[in-house]
Amino acid sequence: MRNWLVLLCPCAVGVVLHLWLLFLSCPASGPGKQHPAGLLAFFPHWKPKHYDVIVGVLSARHNDGLRNAIRSTWFRHLKQHPGLSQRVLVKFIIGAHGCDVPVEDREDPYSCRLLNITNPVLNQEIEAFTLLEDDTSVLSEDRVVSVHFKVLYPIVITSLGVFYDAKGVGFQRNITVKLYQAEQEEALFSARFSPPSCGVQVNRLWYKPVEQFILPESFEGTIVWESQDLQGLVSQNLHKVMVNDGGGVFRITTAGEGSLPHEFTQGVEGIAGGFIYTIQEGDVLLESLQNRPERFIHHISKLEEEDALLKEESNTYDDIVFVDVVDTYRNVPAKLLNFYRWTVEAVSFDVLLKTDDDCYIDLEAVFNRIKLKNLGRPNTWWGNFRLNWAVDRTGKWQELEYPSPAYPAFACGSGYVISKDIVEWLASNSDRLKIYQGEDVSMGIWMAAIGPKRYQDNLWLCEKTCESGMLSSPQYSPEELADLWRIKERCGDPCKCQER
């Protein structure tokens, strides 16, 4: 028996040593891979190293300049600090996958959705909506109806109105047609139809020519038809109308697709008429579509180079967590949830600080304030909170999913601290939490479900400015971050330096 033990002991030691070396040699993560949990996967009862604070820095794949600026400023100071270097862990949060669609071929620069224009209708007028002349279709009488739409490539509106006189008895309605830009209360232009001079009639089609009006790419607007008669206007369900999008140059957004009616409209989602348009600079569009395959090949090659550089950066600094999402602005909330899940699985900690890669952070001041105010308690959310913030329906911060006109309280993105129990709740529910347009507002909506104790602190700055004693400040370039820290190291205050 003793002989068997003598033979087995070296084997057991070898297995443990192999696992330990495997743990040490594993990089934190790499493009396309989740961060390994190391020995925890084999021995779940073993506890990882404990940190007082985990710092998660949201960073875009191409922002190596900002990451290096952080490594040479407040991150370097942390590593050299005798009291904090072993108590704080800093990780950059990066999407493992780059968007495989070139920027010029996306619907917008904030997502990875392909601008899917195929067979554009060039050098001719296009009737936006074709109303069915079938008398059996369901019609409804409404005073006001409207249609919301988005322009994906510039178009020129040449005629406004476009009403069918299905029974050939002449146009007998008094109607005003207006075109609005989203969230603007003043109409860009309008046309009024009143018998007997309603405009031009061609084959039972009534319309009113307008001066050519260009709607640029990414324009979001609303066509509103309003009856001036007591009997209202004849409208038809939008889903029973043929939409002629010119090959994909504009899209109708309806309530069923998540778009919300704007304040100046009322009534039902329906249509009472339309407009006529042409595609602007069709030859330029055609050339762009022809060159698209070549752009994709070049873009994929650049992505491969980017992956290699990120892998090298990760191996060099060991401070990156790659999360399994496509790295775009719209996916930032998903990046954050994935990081929360990683922290719970791989690290032991008390509180988590979230910030962005363009932010100045005074970690020493943050740490001191946590101890002074006892902000490490459970169910704690410490930051600078925006209250009753209006929901944007257009642009970079467009939100079409959240129905309320205002968001719940949320902390501005330059930095905030949450307790471990909140991180654990977010991690455990990450597969069920709905993603909204931004990580800061998403966090506010998620937190509204559990009601943490909020600690308001104006020293987490929401705008790019410098204040003595600030904990954070956003929207800096790498050079500006370096300048702020250089002044702080020389004079103790990043905002001013009185030379003696």
Image (tube, grey):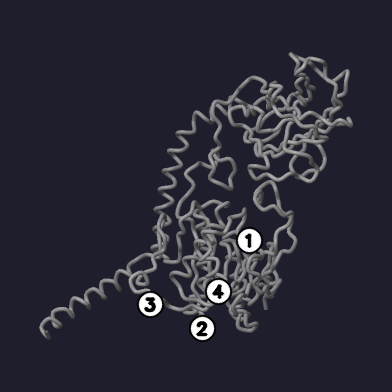
Q: Nearer the viewer, mark 2 or mark 4?
A: 4
Q: How many marks?
A: 4
The residue carrying mark 4 is: 421
Q: In the displayed image of the protein, which residue is found farthest to the bottom?
A: 2
Q: Nearer the viewer, mark 3 or mark 2?
A: 3
Q: Is residue 454 visible to the viewer in this orientation of the structure?
A: yes
Q: Is residue 413 left or right of residue 93?
A: right
Which element is circle 3 on?
loop
Q: Nearer the viewer, mark 3 or mark 1?
A: 3
Which element is circle 1 on?
helix
The residue carrying mark 2 is: 83
The reply to whether callout 2 and callout 4 are in contact (CB within 8 Å) is no
Which element is circle 4 on?
helix
Give coordinates of residue 220: x percent, y percent.
Answer: 70, 40
Identity, as a three-letter code, of the amino acid under mark 2: Gly
- Lower position in the chain sequence, tag 1 or tag 4: 4
Which element is circle 2 on?
loop
- Label 1, label 2: how many angstroms apart (C-alpha)? 31 Å
Q: State the residue in front, 382 or 311.
A: 382
Q: Which mark is residue 45?
A: 3
Query: Dividing the picture into quarters, in which one does residue 127 lie?
Result: top right
Q: Which mark is residue 440?
A: 1
Identity, as a three-letter code, of the amino acid under mark 1: Asp
Identity, as a three-letter code, of the amino acid under mark 3: His
